[in-house]
């Protein structure tokens, strides 16, 4: 399936946080996906496995791969997902593998966090006519100079976990300063301000030439 700019623009206008909006593209059960991010991709992966044929999460850190495998295996349609070792600039997948390639805030213009080599690699594994999307982009001007369009969302935003217990568990790992507040609230929905991070209100995307 080919994604067009208007499809992406319509998709990201849906309710929910930017990560979820970015993946609500017009897909079929045969669509293949690739997610290429670090710790940010659990929510995106959970969204994608309900929508397409295959999800591949690329993660360089073994502890995070283990968490991802456990969470995805327990999720509905978890058999559609696999977690593999790799880096932005060395994705172990063939040319044109995915209809949609997603990175989150772990990607930056720095060579140590993607950079030119990482962007080229994500575009390499994306099919002609497919879409590369970067949620919570680090440097909008840098991406715009490379053909990426920018979209921003307004309104209250929160992270929605599967349970309060999961919210506390992941907060202790990724947001330790907020773990006590998350535990005290007793809710699975946690506002970004409670986690002490800026909400992912924006994304940059590029539809590759057919």
Image: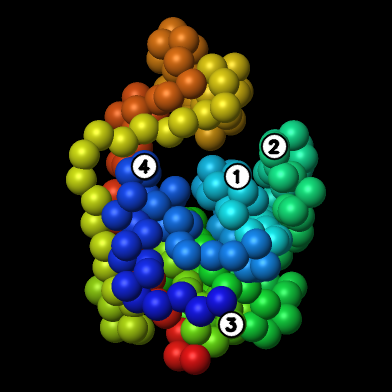
Q: Quadrant of residue 156?
A: top left
Mark 2 vs 4: CB contact within 8 A: no
Q: CA distance from mark 4 to mark 1?
A: 14 Å
Q: Earlier in the sequence, mark 3 or mark 4?
A: 4
The residue lying at 44 percent from left, 48 percent from top is 20
Q: Residues within 10 Å of mark 1 (few under 14, many from 20)?
A: many
Q: Read off the residue under disc 1.
A: 46
User: Is residue 61 found left or right of 12 in the rendered image?
Assistant: right
Q: CA distance from mark 3 to mark 2?
A: 27 Å
Q: Which disc number belongs to residue 75? A: 2
The residue lying at 47 percent from left, 65 percent from top is 26
The residue lying at 70 percent from left, 39 percent from top is 76
Q: Residues within 10 Å of mark 2 (few under 14, many from 20)?
A: some
Q: Earlier in the sequence, mark 4 or mark 1?
A: 4
Reply above or below: 35 against 165.
Answer: below
Q: Which disc number belongs to residue 127? A: 3
User: Is residue 23 found left or right of 53 in the rendered image?
Assistant: left
């Amino acid at each position: 399936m080919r994604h067009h700019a208007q499809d992406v623009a319509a998709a990201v206008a849906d309710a929910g946080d930017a990560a979820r909006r970015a993946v609500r593209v017009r897909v079929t059960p045969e669509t293949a996906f690739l997610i290429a991010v670090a710790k940010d991709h659990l929510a995106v992966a959970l969204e994608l496995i309900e929508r397409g044929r295959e999800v591949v999460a690329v993660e360089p850190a073994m502890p995070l791969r283990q968490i991802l495998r456990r969470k995805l295996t327990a999720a509905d349609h978890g058999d559609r997902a696999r977690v593999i070792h790799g880096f932005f600039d060395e994705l172990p997948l063939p040319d044109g593998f995915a209809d949609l390639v997603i990175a989150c805030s772990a990607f930056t213009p720095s060579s140590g966090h993607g950079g030119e080599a990482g962007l080229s690699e994500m575009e390499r594994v994306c099919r002609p006519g497919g879409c590369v999307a970067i949620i919570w982009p680090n440097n909008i001007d840098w991406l715009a100079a490379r053909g990426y369009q920018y979209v921003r969302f307004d309104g209250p935003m929160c992270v929605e976990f599967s349970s309060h217990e999961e919210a506390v568990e992941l907060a202790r790992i990724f947001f330790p300063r907020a773990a006590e507040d998350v535990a005290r609230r007793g809710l699975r929905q946690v506002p970004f301000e409670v986690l002490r991070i800026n909400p992912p209100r924006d994304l940059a995307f590029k539809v590759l030439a057919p």
